[in-house]
Amino acid sequence: MPELPEVETIARGLDRQVAGDVIESVWLGSKPEPLKSSATELVAALQARKISRVRRAGKHIVFDLEPTTNDGNGNAQWIVHLGMTGSLVVSSPEREREKHTHAVLQLASGRELRFTDPRRFGRLSVIEDFEPPGVEPLQISADNFAALFRGRKTPIKSALLNQRLLSGVGNIYADEALFRAGIRPRRRAASLTRDELKRLHLALKRVLREAIRFGGSSVSDYVDSDGEEGFFQLKHRVYGREGKPCLVCKTPIKRIVIAGRSSHYCPQCQR
DNA sequence: ACTATGTCCTGCGAGC
DNA sequence: TGCTCGCAGGACATAG
């Protein structure tokens, strides 16, 4: 499930591979497509456009498209959200298309950019001047971070997952950050002390940066734009470790469900 | 204005 | 062995 570190890894890889390339043609699958814009709109907006840059915004991959000369389209962007199982891979046209391939962009360089997504939670759209709703966790100050949770009765775990507050944190890194900060996921967000908020802010930034260094976590079927897996799953301390001994105190890791999401924590280390 | 819950979708693994 | 069933979860809709 691509979260901030995975999306960052993919976006960096794509920027390296396709920045400066031109989209010659667009193929879309026939099944009900995971599109936000209409299919014709999407094809029209992408065709013959040059990709100036690829970057990440929250969990979104942003393709900045070079402005066209004949219209005042301005800063059009192709936005890809990978959902749970989406992947975006650069491939040679000869390679067989994977099952659940929903979109293929033929590039002037002769390569293809392929979007596949078995579970169809991913979304494609073309818009102008895209802005994700929440704040980037790697940019936010400690004070602004603390202010996000003021007065919120919802569990801190749910607040971390709320993309309108923070942009890019998903289930894995929420659990991992809470473990590293020593805070139980069910704690009401507003009940966190100033010290705990400080620890959480630091822990979150550290775990995200470390995960980016490791190329993200490959748990289900995440691969980067080269089709390569990440390695941060080997560094998980609580996520996916139910019943296994805590790496700090050997207490078995617990798994509970919060707002329909599985949450992993150490009952000894997290309070 | 918040918060909680249901829905989408397919593959996979547990259990019989 | 082969089947059913439940689970995985990001974002959004809807209800409270």
Image (spheres, coloured by chain):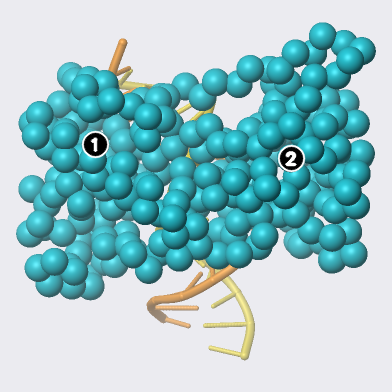
Chain colours: A cyan, B orange, C yellow
Q: Residues within 10 Å of mark 2 (few under 14, many from 20)?
A: some
Q: Which sits in the foreground, A64 or C6?
A: A64
Q: Which sits in the foreground, A52 or A119?
A: A52
Nearer mark to the viewer, of 2 and 1: 2
At mark 1, the secondary structure is helix
* Amino acid type of the residue that numbered disc 2 sits on in the rendered structure: Ala
Q: Which mark is residue A124?
A: none
Instruction: Where is residue A39? Give x, y as percent.
Output: 82, 31
Q: Residue drawn at (41%, 62%), measured in percent from left and top?
A: A232
Residue A57 position (above or below residue A105)? above
At mark 2, the secondary structure is loop
Q: Which sits in the foreground, A125 or B10?
A: A125
Q: Residue drawn at (79%, 58%), measured in percent from left and top?
A: A91
Q: Residue drawn at (58%, 53%), measured in percent from left and top?
A: A85
Q: Which mark is residue A201?
A: 1
Q: CA distance from mark 2 to mark 1?
A: 33 Å
Question: Could you tell me if residue A194 is visible in this image?
Answer: yes
Number of numbered callouts drawn: 2
* Amino acid type of the residue that numbered disc 1 sits on in the rendered structure: His
Give the chain of mark 1. Answer: A
Name the quadrant containing residue A69.
top right
Q: Which mark is residue A19?
A: 2
Instruction: Where is residue A44? Give x, y as percent.
Output: 88, 26
Residue A78 position (above or below residue A238)? above
Question: Could you tell me if residue A2 is visible in this image?
Answer: no
Using residue A159 as the reference point, say whether residue A231 is left or right of it: right
Give the chain of mark 2. Answer: A
Using residue A188 as the reference point, say whether residue A139 is left or right of it: right
Using residue A131 as the reference point, say whether residue B16 is left or right of it: left
Q: Residue drawn at (38%, 48%), measured in percent from left and top?
A: A209
